[in-house]
Image (tube, grey):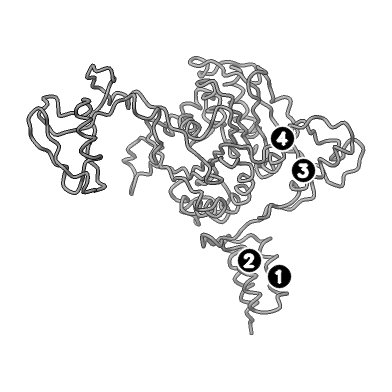
Amino acid sequence: MSTIKDELVAELERRVGDKILERTNADLLEKLIRNADSDNEAMMIAELGTTYKRTGLHFDKRLEKMTSDIRYFRKNEKLSFHTDDAKPTHKLIIGDNYEALQNLLIQYKGKVSVIYIDPPYGKDSMGEFAQTNYENAITRDNLLSMLYPRLMLAKQLLSDNGVIFCSIDDKNQAYVKCLFDEVFGEGNFISCVSWLRNYASANDSKRFASVVDYLLVYGKTRNYTRNLLPRTDKQNQLYKYDSLDGKGKWRPDNLSVRTYSANYDYPIINPNTGEAYNPPKGRCWMTNKETVERWINEGRVFFGQDKKGAPQLKRYLNEVQKGVVPTTFWSYEECGHNDEARRELKEIFSNPPFDSPKPIRLLLQILKIASNPDSIILDFFAGSGTTGHAVLDLNEKDGGDRQFILCQLNEKTETTPNGIACDVTSKRLKRVMTGECYDGTKDFDWMKKNKPYGGNLDVYEIASVANFESTEGKTPFDVVDETLYGQDKFKTLREKIEWVCKNFSNTQKTLKE
């Protein structure tokens, strides 16, 4: 006769068979269940790690692999380059972004202003499982488990007034938002932006045409304050009237508001016709009678071109905000679209290496809203390097000294035999910053319309050394270069040992809350 423990273990096996629970996790849970003191304790163990307290979201957490090796930065001299010491030195880190984030905490904890990530969430972009997530190639447990510890590390890197943007599709938005609510707190949710990523009509769609992606936006704390976006020529063109009164151009605006107040419900007399105008039903005027009469005398109230119409307020261009408040809908006219992004890559690489890259204008919009001229910007799913390209472009436009830090796994594919980071990310940065590739070639279309941005790039790889290594010249204290972490060379071995022991213990174990 089976016991509750037997049933719990059988359920674990079913979940392994359905590929929603990792074998290593199941084996550990089974061991704990078998040795539980009671059935109640066994059931609690079976639920271990599957429930988030705040959101109620259930999924099986996959743990990062434990290791006794120390992971550290090693500079790739062949891929690194410097063109101008007066410009910022940016960083590209090649390797697992979990290990990269752990290392970045040594130098950049609490210093990053903006994080943008575009995690791999679509079909054929991660994992080997199918038929479990709207026919995506990754189970949602894998996606959330992969993101969770990385977001915990990223949160530590953000400054108190920092902000993180996460691109996500409509299929996973709800689940990833729950994860962000858990990590960053619902009170730090700022917005969910809809970006019109595809301008095509998609008439061949059998159901609905999918043309929108989302950007989840969270602050580390409530201290985040957004920047205003620059006013566009199209917006300024709305101010097309000029009364030649020295106040400049203006546009007519509604003088009534929906927030009703009896004190602001009164007739306005057109001084040209003597006709009285009351506010529309359910509305009132935006201010009291005395103020409106003063505005009429100052010529700030408009009664139509023939001076015989209803009252409107003159909104002067020189009195509006110097910028525009960002909205939660970004059109392809202002932020680009997927086809534009592919054309951008084609100008740099004759054969675009990605099917769904993000356009530079999308990242520029994010940077304008969230960054300052001296900000540090991090992208730990760098892909082709669009975030770095956008930082360079904005620095060129406004004279800023923003620094980007990109992390990219060097995954090898048929089109990237040396790995994505080596064949795509680093090459894109090299070409747009110096005007040539690593082999000296300059025959790419981007150079026909643009000038190289200049600047400096340090490329690091993730190396490892056993924490018990004692061979002379190969110990952690020999191979770890403190200057790669913004640290001056230590004068004594004792100082170096203390620094390594203090800062690199976290690179050997799984992050815990």
Q: Nearer the N terminus, badge 4 or badge 3? A: 4
Whole-percent x and y of residue 48? 63, 66
Q: Nearer the N terminus, badge 2 or badge 3? A: 2
- Provide the secondary structure element on which disc 3 rests: helix
Q: Nearer the N terminus, badge 3 or badge 1? A: 1
- Provide the secondary structure element on which disc 4 rests: strand
Occupied quadrant, residue 95: top right
Occupied quadrant, residue 255: top left
Q: Give the residue at the far right of this rendering.
A: 472
Answer above or below: position of 5 versus 179: below
The three-letter amino acid code for the residue at tag 2 is: Leu
Which of the numbered marks, if any, corresponds to residue 32?
A: 1
Q: How far apart are marks 2 and 4 (CA)?
A: 35 Å
**Classed neighbour count for the residue bearing mark 3: other residues with Cα under 10 Å, few (<14), some (14–19), many (≥20):** some
Q: Is residue 377 left or right of residue 299?
A: right
Front residue of this view, candidates 427 and 178: 178
Cβ–Cβ below 8 Å for labels 4 and 3?
A: no
Residue at image coords 51%, 49%: 188
**Classed neighbour count for the residue bearing mark 1: other residues with Cα under 10 Å, few (<14), some (14–19), many (≥20):** some
Quickly name the residue at label 3.
503
The three-letter amino acid code for the residue at tag 1 is: Leu
**Classed neighbour count for the residue bearing mark 2: other residues with Cα under 10 Å, few (<14), some (14–19), many (≥20):** few
Front residue of this view, candidates 366 and 351: 366
